[in-house]
Protein backbone atom coordinates (compact mmCIF):
# COMPACT_ATOMS: atom_id res chain seq x y z
CA UNK A 1 0.00 0.00 0.00
CA UNK A 2 1.45 3.32 -1.03
CA UNK A 3 0.62 6.73 0.33
CA UNK A 4 -0.57 9.08 -2.42
CA UNK A 5 0.70 12.27 -0.78
CA UNK A 6 4.37 12.93 -0.20
CA UNK A 7 5.14 13.32 3.51
CA UNK A 8 6.34 16.77 4.58
CA UNK A 9 8.55 15.20 7.27
CA UNK A 10 9.82 11.70 8.02
CA UNK A 11 10.61 10.52 11.53
CA UNK A 12 12.77 7.38 11.48
CA UNK A 13 12.49 5.79 14.91
CA UNK A 14 13.86 2.35 14.09
CA UNK A 15 15.81 1.07 17.07
CA UNK A 16 13.88 3.20 19.58
CA UNK A 17 11.99 1.18 22.20
CA UNK A 18 8.61 2.14 23.61
CA UNK A 19 7.51 4.63 24.80
CA UNK A 20 9.93 6.77 22.75
CA UNK A 21 8.16 6.36 19.37
CA UNK A 22 4.99 7.84 20.90
CA UNK A 23 6.86 10.66 22.66
CA UNK A 24 8.91 11.64 19.60
CA UNK A 25 5.90 11.40 17.28
CA UNK A 26 3.81 13.73 19.44
CA UNK A 27 6.72 16.18 19.80
CA UNK A 28 7.23 16.24 16.03
CA UNK A 29 3.51 16.79 15.36
CA UNK A 30 3.40 19.67 17.86
CA UNK A 31 6.18 21.42 15.95
CA UNK A 32 4.52 21.07 12.56
CA UNK A 33 2.00 23.33 10.83
CA UNK A 34 -1.61 22.16 10.70
CA UNK A 35 -2.23 20.01 7.64
CA UNK A 36 1.37 18.91 7.14
CA UNK A 37 1.92 15.17 6.82
CA UNK A 38 4.32 13.25 9.05
CA UNK A 39 5.61 9.81 8.09
CA UNK A 40 6.74 7.75 11.09
CA UNK A 41 8.84 4.59 10.69
CA UNK A 42 9.32 2.38 13.74
CA UNK A 43 10.20 -1.22 14.53
CA UNK A 44 8.87 -1.30 18.10
CA UNK A 45 5.93 -3.77 18.13
CA UNK A 46 4.08 -1.85 20.85
CA UNK A 47 4.06 1.29 18.72
CA UNK A 48 1.65 -0.30 16.23
CA UNK A 49 -1.06 0.15 18.86
CA UNK A 50 0.36 2.98 20.99
CA UNK A 51 1.20 5.56 18.30
CA UNK A 52 -2.30 5.57 16.74
CA UNK A 53 -4.05 5.59 20.14
CA UNK A 54 -2.03 8.54 21.43
CA UNK A 55 -2.09 10.51 18.17
CA UNK A 56 -5.89 10.26 17.95
CA UNK A 57 -6.24 11.07 21.66
CA UNK A 58 -4.26 14.27 21.01
CA UNK A 59 -6.53 15.25 18.11
CA UNK A 60 -4.42 14.18 15.12
CA UNK A 61 -5.79 12.27 12.14
CA UNK A 62 -4.27 9.60 9.93
CA UNK A 63 -3.94 9.87 6.16
CA UNK A 64 -4.37 6.08 6.00
CA UNK A 65 -4.42 3.04 8.25
CA UNK A 66 -1.10 2.09 9.89
CA UNK A 67 0.98 -0.25 7.74
CA UNK A 68 2.90 -3.28 8.93
CA UNK A 69 5.81 -3.91 6.56
CA UNK A 70 7.74 -6.91 7.86
CA UNK A 71 9.39 -5.80 11.12
CA UNK A 72 8.62 -2.13 10.42
CA UNK A 73 5.51 -0.09 11.07
CA UNK A 74 4.58 2.97 9.02
CA UNK A 75 2.26 5.76 10.06
CA UNK A 76 1.07 8.76 8.06
CA UNK A 77 -0.33 11.40 10.41
CA UNK A 78 -1.66 14.89 9.69
CA UNK A 79 -0.56 17.62 12.10
Image: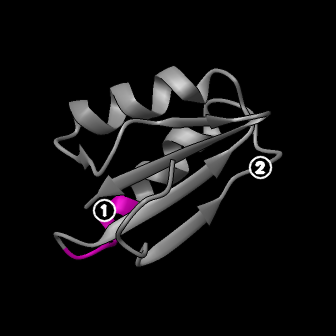
> Is residue 24 found inside the magenta-colored segment of the image?
no
Q: State whether residue 77 is above or below residue 71.
A: below
Q: State whether residue 74 is above or below residue 8.
A: above
The picture places residue 17, in percent across and down from the top left corner, at: 75, 34
Which residue has dot 1 on it?
30
Would residue 60 appear left or right of 28 to someone viewing this image? left
Q: Distance between the residues labelled 1 and 2?
A: 21 Å
Would residue 43 appear left or right of 36 to someone viewing this image? right
Which residue has dot 2 on it?
14
- Badge 2: few (under 14), some or many (20 or more) residues near its Cα, within 10 Å? some
Query: Which residue lies at the image location 42% right of the left edge and 76% below the top edge?
Result: 6
Q: Which of 4 and 37 is in front in this view?
A: 4
Query: Which residue lies at the image location 55% right of the left edge and 69% below the top edge?
Result: 10
State which mark lies toward you, 1 or 2. Answer: 2
SS category of the residue bearing label 2: loop
Q: State whether residue 10 is above or below residue 75.
A: below
Q: Which of marks 1 and 2 is nearer the N terminus?
A: 2
The picture places residue 40, in percent across and down from the top left corner, at: 54, 54
Residue range (magenta): 29-33
Would residue 36 appear left or right of 26 to someone viewing this image? left
Q: Is the magenta stretch mostly helix, strand or loop?
A: loop
Amino acid sequence: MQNDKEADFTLDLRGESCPYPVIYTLEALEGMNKGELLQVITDCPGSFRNVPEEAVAHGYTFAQDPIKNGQEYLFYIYA
